Amino acid sequence: MAHSQNQPRLKILPASSVQRKPVGHSLLLTCRPEVPDTNLISDLRWNDNRNMTILPKPAGQSSPLIYTESIAGGTALALIFNSLQESMAGTYFCAASYSVTEKLNAAVVVETYVAITWKDAPTDQRPLMGTDYIVRCEVTANPPATVDWLRNGDQIKSSGRYVIENRGLLIKNITEADDGVYTCRAAVMSTGELKNREIRVEVQIMPQVQRLPLVLDAVEGQSFSVMCNATGKPVPEFQWIKKGTQQNAADLDRFSVNSITGQLDISTVEQQDHDNYACIARNPAGQSESVMKLNVLIRPKIIEFINITVSENEEAVFVCKAFGRPAPEITFRRYGTVEEYSIGLQVSDDRIILEQSTDDEKGETVGTLRISKLATTDDGLYECIARNRGDVAFKVGHITVEYRPIFDHLKALPPVYTWEERPANLSCFAQAIPNATIEWRFNDRRIQDLYDQNLHIENEGLRSDLIVTPRDRRYYTAYKCVANNRLGSAEHIMELREARIPEMVPQAKPRIVSATSITFDIMAPPVEPGLPLTAFSVQWKEQFQSDWNFALNRTWSPDSPYIVEGLRPQTAYSFRFAARNVVGLSQWGAYVDQSTPRRSEPETPRILHTPIQDEEEDSDPIVTSPYADHFDMRWSIPVDNGEPIDMYRIKYCPGTKVNGYWTEMEEHCIEQDIARMTNYEMRSLQADTYYRIELMAHNAIGFSKPAHVLMKTARGESDHSLGTTYDVYPAGFGGFSSASTLAGSPTDVTLLLLTVSFVCRFVFV
């Protein structure tokens, strides 16, 4: 054995006698002499499977498919396969000479095979739902490979909907549930080669456009939008086509299309847009479409509505013409009202008939309103209303009703008065269409024919004025105004009366007597219609004075209080009264003697708040505050009874009424003196609580009798600007407030506890 190891030989690396490699791969075989002295090796070479010597790579040229190359300092020779081909399989020999005479040889077998190659196996495949689809996975290999399929790590068996074929995996009637990642696995048992190919399958669904309405209305001059919806996978894109011209709507002026949402917009609709439009949804699985008709509506336009003039008791024919698409419907109504006339005879007025005729081809409608036995009340404005699906149009017209003259507006007027030959104006105005002319008559004779200088006529048209200067009493009489137009005539009697001063005042009574003033009730004397009283006058003097020439005077308007002021206390006065009209002052009458009392305390102030209720006749009136925590008390200045009022005193106390008796919490009363003011703001009140208020006026003599009122505060939170806070609770027993926060001042807490104690005492009596 030692001898054989020292014998010269050639060794091929890798050491295996058979080298098995796939086609297309590279291979390096090294022939290395194992001899005692490598310098004695000569003619080292490689021969191919045809025993032809394989040459080295030529200098400066590209590498051939197979060549030799000296390595390891020339002590070894490499055989290099750049890319193995099936034709290169066979036995390759390495040969050399040792010491010239000894021939050395070694051989190696090169075997090739075709590795697993994916021939037709796209990694993304998109079948169409509902079809039979082969998930493609074709494999080439030599020796041939076997192929199986996996999904989610589980092997797919050829059965039912799945059939494994040479071309791939057949899935029958594919559904969206078949989405997923499939593994195509190829194996060559003889070589042990195993390869996996992951294929993502995404099932595509052909678009399905939701059916559009057959017809959609768009109004000329307005904008329009319509949405096209479709299902599909992947999400389809949208396109709109104008069918009449086969134009893409996205390319048209005023049109815009959102290819993602399918919305079609028209900024301003024109009549030429009237056409059929198709919405087309596309994705890689296919396309679907739906067609709708765009009906362009023309808004109604009233093209004729002419005012008419018709005589009373005749028939009025009021015609209104309108245009639009579709042809509009026409109705009428009185202008300013809501109710419209209906087609045909009107239930509310059988004199009125509404007729309508339509020409759909021209888009025109004629509406006719007929009113028989026309009355003056039919005169006025009427509104023609034209409607279609696009809009509503309005136009106002006028029916003028001609009628004979009437004097209805003058019948309630009083006579005309004058005196002392002052000119009087008798004005006559006749209502009539057409306008009437007027003439005047005196004792049934035309005044124009009398040539009386005391009777002067100004104007004889629609209005005429008769100026009468009554030089003697015969002019105080009735005058006739006669109005005429082509439909007839009417007469109106106007009376001229002589005006006189009023009769004496029949009676005057003192109503309120104080130390310095007296208020009277005056009975007015009878008056003529149209000759009202303009004033009342009074004269007064002290009773010891006999001459009225030194009396004092005062005049009042008829609607004012009749108060005489500035009187002296404890003094007897005489009063007399007279009435005045435009003619003059009546004679003095209604004599009254009245003495003023001594100076005393003021009269009771009058509280200016309106009571909300009176529980009993003798109970105080109840007023309410709109606020929960304050109240603005107001009153009028009372009579001072000879001494000026210098202050007011107000007192208010919380309390309640138990068994018909008012009880107040004296310890919580507030009393305040106010200097010559007529209002006082009560603050820091409790919400939903009754207060009894007492008000007195004061002068140098003393206090007046008190005025009393009950006031109730509102429920609700306090006004924090006033420095108090209250929560809202239901009213306490008997009307006391139970609303007071413990976060308030100690006084507030004490008041709350006292209130509860006070109320409980009455509840459990």
Image (cartoon, rainbow, N blue to C red):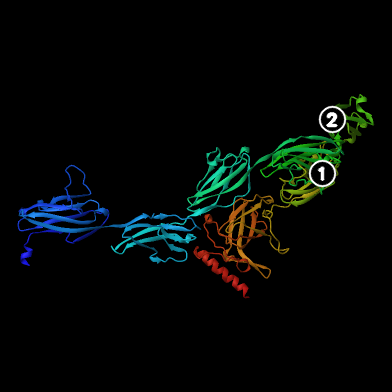
Mark 2 residue type: Asp
How far from the left and from the top, in percent, is residue 317?
Answer: 81, 38
For this orientation, the residue located farthest to the right is: 444
Front residue of 528/283: it is 283
Give the crowd class for mark 1: few <14, some 14-19, many >=20 residues within 10 Å: some
- Give the x, y percent position of residue 633: 62, 55
Circles 2 and 1 in contact, beta carbons < 8 Å = no
Judged by depth in the image, the label closer to the viewer, 2 or 1, is: 1
Compared across the picture, whether 35 is left or right of 764 comes to left
Q: Secondary structure at mark 1?
A: strand
Q: Which mark is residue 329?
A: none
Q: Which amino acid does the dot numbered 1 rest on?
A: Ile
Which is more toward the observer, 311 or 669? 311
725 is higher (above) or lower (below) than 238: below
Identify residue for label 1.
Answer: 353
Residue at 18% across, 51% down: 52
Quarter that holds the N terminus? bottom left
Between 751 and 561, the one nearer to me in the picture: 751
The reply to whether residue 344 is visible in this rendering is: yes
Which quadrant of the rendered structure holds the C terminus? bottom right
State left or right for residue 130 relative to residue 478. Answer: left
Q: How many marks?
A: 2
631 or 166: nearer the viewer: 166
Left or right of 14 on screen, residue 22: right
Q: Which structural element holds mark 2?
A: strand
**Residue pointed to by mark 2:** 465
Provide residue 31's location: percent of width, then percent of height: 14, 56
- Badge 2 density bin: few <14, some 14–19, many ≥20, Cα 10 Å: many
Q: Which label's residue is closer to the chain start, 2 or 1?
A: 1
- Indicate the quadrant where residue 705 lies: bottom right
Q: Is 532 placed above or below 617 here?
A: above
